[in-house]
Amino acid sequence: MSAVEVVSPQQSPSRQLHKFGGSSLADPDCFRRVARILGQYSGDTDIIVVSAAGKTTNHLIEWIGLLGKDGRLAHESLQSLRKYQQDLIENLIEGEQKQVLVDALYKDFSALAQAGENPLTEAQRAWSQGFGEVWSARLLSALLSQSELPAVQLDSRRFLRAERGAQPEVDRASSWPLLKEQLVQHTKRRIVITGFMAQNSAGETVLLGRNGSDYSATIIGALADVSRVTIWSDVAGVYSADPRTVGDACLLPLLRLDEAAELARLAAPVLHTRTLQPVAQSCIDLNLRCSYDPESGSTRIERVLASGRGAKIITSLGEVCLLQLDVPKSHDFGVARQDIERLLVRNQILPLASSYSADQHRIQLAYTAEVVNSVLEQLQDAGVPADIRLREGYSMVAAVGAGVTANPVHCHGFYQQLRSQPIEFISESASGLSIAAILRKTNTAALVSDIHRALFQAQRSIGLVLLGKGNIGSRWLSLFAEQKAALEKRHGMSFELISVLDSDSLWVDFNGIDAESVMTRFDEMATPYQGGEWLTHLLNHPYDEIVVLDVTASASLSLQYPDLAEHGYHLISANKFAGSAHGDLYHQVQDAFAKTGRFWLYNATVGAGLPVNHAVRDLRESGDQITAISGIFSGTLSWLFQQYNSEIPFSELLEQAWQQGLTEPDPREDLSGADVMRKLVILARESGLDLEPEQVQVQSLVPESLSQLSLDAFLDHSSELDDVLEEWWNKARKEHGVLRYVARLSRKGKARVGIEVLPEEHPLANLLPCDNIFAIESQWYRENPLVIRGPGAGRDVTAGALLSDLNRIAALLK
């Protein structure tokens, strides 16, 4: 990378870049879908890089090829392409702007036709092929502006500089100041930029070659100092195999940069080595997503080196050629090999796979059919001391993943599936990131499916991260230790506790932490951390999946939930803050998990181990409509009011409940009604209502004088509660009723939590201590509500609810 300091010019640090390929812009519906995506996922100053719509570039190449063969067919080809482009405009743009675009299009086709009257130079051919990107940028910027997303188009040749070559490289030093000038001019609009093209010192168009649009996207992203580049295409990202041929291939939400680079080196179509170079040399994140189904998940490429334990991806390639180099016996084979390897590195023509046979004095280098002739010429021009033969008719299958060459199970499985195949040679990469087999032409689709099944249907590994080791966390650790073997047998997966955190310290061990030793060894093994630093300690984990269990009552931790989803982690939460937060945050968390294909389960937030969330959600998703929910939602307050009869002061009962672990860590969370309010908001949202916390009328039992005290000071002065509660008890006695703290929600969104005097025979009045009761009224349960009743507080039932959610995630991952 050139020694250029990249400083972002007058822009938001959150500016992102979105790249859309030709398949994402193939027809009017595709363009509209892209506009909707940008309306939802892009900011006002984001950059958009576009390819030519559909097969436009192929049609331009076809026209160029016909020019010297058949003028009539060339004319028809050009007119067909003009009609396709004009139809896009006619179907998408309204008003005066439509005619403006049509006039500009006719002018471009007139210029093409005029240029085609004479043989085209190499520069003119490049200029002609670049029109597809120009038309896409022009049309999309107009469509966005029409959709009230102000946008401007920008031709990449105005700032990207590169010289013509087999694989042109952008000159960052000269491109950066030119891009800076453009960005300064457009500080409040989205900028739609043409991909695939640059300009040389002579002012001629330079095409950036295979995957040039993706490469131009990441290079522009690096120069513009964007925080993220998202490449939108017709697939959601990188899969464990080609999903078109392997039915159980799974999307990989996270891929480390060196694994992605190895996959690109092996010519996987979803990635290209040059696309990744700017990512490795900058601070941008790279995401791959599907424009046809934005919610289908994504793959995030992380700029960290992977420390893994085996294969993640099985890939294949059809048209592979071999260059066979036979070194004369009179030459030192070791020296010849070193000279050839240095030549390959210097000319950046490293093979897909290679074989060196000292006894035969033979070297075999595998390349794609696309580049093999160029490599052959370079080897011949370099005067390599060997007889070089080009051999065609080969294919390749490879297993890719950090540590794959050191994984005996994966290596054995790979070799076993190949034992009956026509193998030419098998090559293990020096980096340990891949094993590649070069085969005489065979059915690679069936072979890939067999290898995928052999390697990945083995036991999957699940890493568990526990946030909080207090009352609930410590009980969950004991329960997990008891149930670990049964859990693994039930799901055919391994489950390892790999990290435990408290408010300021963490213990991480990827080899696994004995759950039974956490409480005694944590202080010895843990190290300090601040804020979200703990996430960086998990980056190089070797597990197939990570599940985070949040058993804290931390609002700040809940703000990190979108980061968990973005890292590809699943979440089980007993923490109520995110589920009951303001709608913007709640939907942000929901969207983050949905868009990454991760799971967020939070049954333990309401009713401890009772399946309340599941029941409400299941009713709604089955077509029912919830009309009202009421009940006793707090096991703590249920216990307190069941015990309270004014003979024992309320404050003493509160102290007992706190000592027994029946309250939140700070019992004011229960007494203030905040805990019940959060549960009501969570249930309202599960039932399909957009209820905000501030819309709930909450009656607090905490006097203002006690609300701001420390926990110890509050407990010392809790006797101030007694007079207030005694008044309520006297009121209930006069009305021949009992006191209960009740939550109520109607379909119209009216919500309240507070003390009520209920008749002794009322269904909400007759509970066992600590019981919760939820009465759910709906269209189906109008006359006779669905009632769920049982223990709603206590470390045992809450820990059980967490383990239940872990079982559910394990089932969903199968």
Image (cartoon, helix red, strand yellow):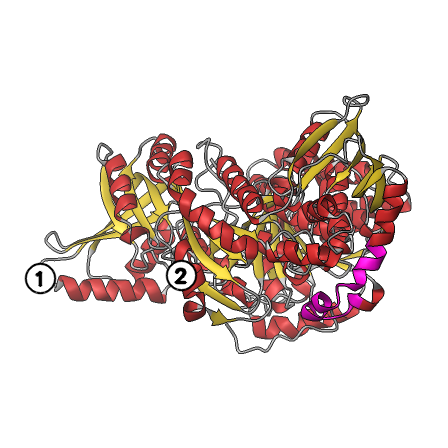
Mark yes or no: residue 791 visible.
yes
The magenta-colored residue range is 706-725
Q: Are marks 2 and 1 in contact (CB under 8 Å)?
A: no
Mark closer to the observer (2, 1) = 2
Disc 2 marks a residue whose amino acid type is: Asp
Whole-percent x, y for residue 304 in the image: 47, 63
> Closer to the camera, 234 or 551?
551
> Closer to the camera, 748 or 427?
748
> Which numbered tag is attached to residue 357?
none
Judging by the rendered image, the residue that carries numbered circle 2 is: 509
Disc 1 marks a residue whose amino acid type is: Ser
In which quadrant of the rendered view does residue 8 lie?
bottom right
Figure label count: 2
Q: As drawn, is 291 to the left or to the right of 65? A: right
Where disc 1 sits, the SS reads loop
Judging by the rendered image, the residue that carries numbered circle 1 is: 330
Whole-percent x, y for residue 178 in the image: 68, 72
Whole-percent x, y for residue 809 in the image: 52, 40
Q: Residue at x 38, y 51 (%)?
A: 401
Q: Residue at x 79, y 40 (%)?
A: 89
Mark with earlier residue (2, 1): 1
Residue that extends furthest to the front in the rendered view of this protein: 647
Q: Residues within 10 Å of mark 1 (few under 14, many from 20)?
A: few
Where disc 2 sits, the SS reads loop
Q: CA distance from mark 2 to mark 1?
A: 55 Å
In which quadrant of the rendered view does residue 422 lie?
top left
Image vertical order of residue 577 relative to residue 777, above or below: below
